[in-house]
């Protein structure tokens, strides 16, 4: 690994930690970057997942004030993210690497679509009256959605934050910043559970140098994202994500 590669991975980790805290989808920076640098898809996915855990922790801590008095919601949704992550990570370990390599371009495309529709979902959530009553089925649908997002995150990880925000925006009338705080905590649970699963059962697919450098960048990025990241124009973030994700799809499909 060259010095330039180290700098690029740390920078990508920093960008991912910042973006994950603000809008989600930071893995669409780190994962494609690792592919472009020549890492196999499975190694890139597993190493990236583990490396982003510190960024999730620092970003969640930065949003702690939005969570005050709302721990019951996290205690209700957290176990669903936990179980979903175990299911997704198990599928990643059971299915052959060839299957992941074939599926991942589709997953990246889905993730990019979620990034693009994210602003519409957030505007819809912001326009909802805080006093508007939620239908009774929303609570159950929200639980199912959190489980599915956990399974998605455990298997792949990219844009699970955007997926969660889409689910929250459609099914919850709570303030957007609080929903973002929920998203940060639940995404961290998913990444942490998947990371433990990979360490226990997929050590051969882990590049620990990649993990270290992404972890350094993502931890600092999580702090920055929670403090000043909201000042970054969302359109610029989304444009960068779509560009890098598209490059990764082209590389996987045209230059396997």
Image (tube, rainbow, N blue to C red):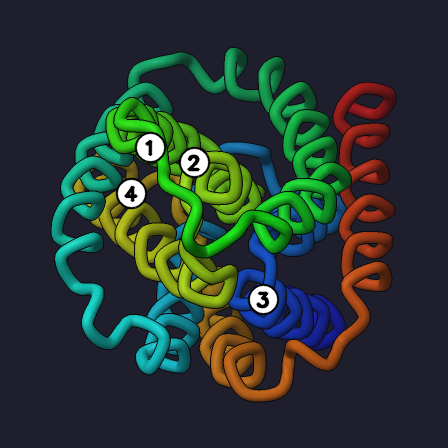
Q: Are marks 1 and 2 in contact (CB under 8 Å)?
A: yes
**Circle 1: element type:** helix
The residues tagged by marks 1 and 3 sit, at their Cα atoms, a distance apart of 21 Å
Drawn side of residue 67 relative to residue 29, left or right: left
Q: Which mark is residue 142?
A: 1
Question: Disc 1 or 3, which lies upstream in sequence?
Answer: 3
Of 126 and 106, the residue lying toward us: 126
How crowded pointer 1 is (Cα within 10 Å; few <14, some 14-19, many 20+) is rated as: some
**Circle 4: element type:** helix
Q: Is residue 213 above or below residue 44?
A: below
Q: Residue at x 73, y 31 (%)?
A: 113
Question: Disc 3 or 4, which lies upstream in sequence?
Answer: 3
The residues tagged by marks 1 and 2 sit, at their Cα atoms, a distance apart of 6 Å
Q: Are marks 2 and 3 in contact (CB under 8 Å)?
A: no
Question: Disc 1 or 2, which lies upstream in sequence?
Answer: 1
**Circle 2: element type:** helix
Which of discs 4 and 1 lies nearer the camera? The answer is 1
Drawn side of residue 37 relative to residue 202, left or right: right
**Residue placed under numbered mark 2 in the picture:** 171
Q: Residue at x 57, y 77 (%)?
A: 225
**Residue placed under numbered mark 3 in the picture:** 22
Question: Disc 4 or 2, which lies upstream in sequence?
Answer: 2
Please state the horizontal and vertical placement of residue 250, each as a whole percent of the image. 85, 29
Question: Disc 4 or 1, which lies upstream in sequence?
Answer: 1
């Amino acid at each position: 690994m060259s010095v330039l590669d180290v700098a690029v991975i740390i920078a990508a980790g920093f960008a991912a930690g910042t973006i994950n805290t603000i809008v989600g989808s930071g893995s669409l920076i780190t994962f494609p970057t690792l592919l472009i640098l020549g890492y196999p898809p499975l190694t890139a996915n597993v190493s990236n997942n583990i490396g982003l855990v510190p960024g999730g922790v620092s970003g969640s801590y930065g949003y702690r004030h939005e969570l005050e008095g709302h721990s019951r919601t996290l205690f209700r949704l957290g176990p669903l993210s936990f179980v979903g992550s175990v299911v997704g990570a198990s599928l990643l370990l059971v299915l052959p690497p060839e299957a992941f390599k074939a599926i991942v371009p589709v997953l990246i495309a889905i993730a990019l679509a979620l990034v693009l529709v994210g602003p519409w979902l957030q505007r819809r959530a912001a326009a909802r009256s805080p006093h508007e009553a939620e239908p009774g089925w929303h609570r159950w649908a929200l639980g199912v959605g959190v489980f599915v997002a956990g399974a998605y995150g455990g298997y792949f990880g990219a844009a699970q934050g955007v997926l969660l925000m889409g689910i929250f925006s459609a099914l919850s009338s709570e303030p957007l910043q609080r929903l973002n705080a929920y998203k940060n905590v639940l995404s961290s649970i998913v990444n942490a559970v998947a990371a433990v699963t990979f360490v226990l059962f997929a050590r051969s697919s882990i590049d620990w140098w990649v993990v270290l450098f992404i972890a350094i960048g993502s931890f600092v990025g999580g702090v920055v994202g929670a403090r000043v990241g909201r000042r970054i124009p969302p359109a610029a973030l989304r444009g960068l994500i779509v560009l890098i994700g598209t490059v990764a799809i082209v590389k996987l499909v045209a230059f396997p």
